Amino acid sequence: MEKIQAEFEVTVGDFRKAFYFGTFLRHRRPLQIMFVVLAVGVLYAIGMQMGLGPGNYLVLFLAAAYLVWGLLLLAGTERNIRRSLRAPGCLIGSRYVMTLESHRIRIQIPARKVDITKQVNQLACVFELSQLFLIYVDSQQVYLLPHRSLTEQQRLALRKNFRERLEDRFSSRFEKRR
């Protein structure tokens, strides 16, 4: 892989996509259950209205409870996003310089005096979403690399490199799961 250097600013939209991805990743199973229960609840309510059988309001109550939980989860996520944006160490709007080589990644944020160099195979994991890469340096530090700062060839090379170096610690929505 050729050396790739990307200069960019992370926007609030990029940050919001990453934050929601994290929320959906952490709560994947309960959210899947919620969507199934909501679908069953809607179909059950339609069946009740059409007179297809006796109504049991417990099903509707359960669907309503999951809906409230889902709305509270999303509201809490939005509150956490706003709190993070107001935090003094917020990196939104700062100029990033990322240098990516086949074996090494360097992340610099000159305004915040951040300069991290890490071997690619030592990264905790990398996720590729539709518009950005989430690069987890460790379990607590994640940096965003928007697709808009890369050419199509660079994205393909980066995806291939992450797949080879990280194996199961790389996940992309553009590749089929094994």
Image (tube, rainbow, N blue to C red):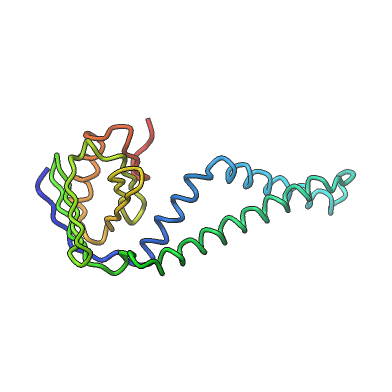
Q: Position of residue 156 (x, y in %)?
A: 22, 46
Tell me the residue at 26%/35% (across/down).
Answer: 166
Tell me the residue at 22%/34% (across/down).
Answer: 164
Residue placed farthest to the top in the image? 178
166 to the left or right of 23 = left
Residue 160, quarter of picture: top left
13 to the left or right of 80 = left
Q: Position of residue 148 (x, y in %)?
A: 26, 61
109 to the left or right of 38 = left
| Viewer-closest of 44 and 143 | 143
Residue placed farthest to the right in the image? 54
| Viewer-closest of 48 and 118 | 118
Q: Position of residue 80 (x, y in %)?
A: 48, 61
Q: Quadrant of the C terminus?
A: top left
90 to the left or right of 22 = left
Residue placed farthest to the left in the image? 2
Residue 101, quarter of picture: top left
Q: Position of residue 11 (x, y in %)?
A: 33, 67
Tell me the residue at 84%/54% (across/down).
Answer: 49
Q: Quadrant of the N terminus?
A: top left
| Viewer-closest of 95 and 46 | 95
Tell me the residue at 35%/67% (across/down).
Answer: 88
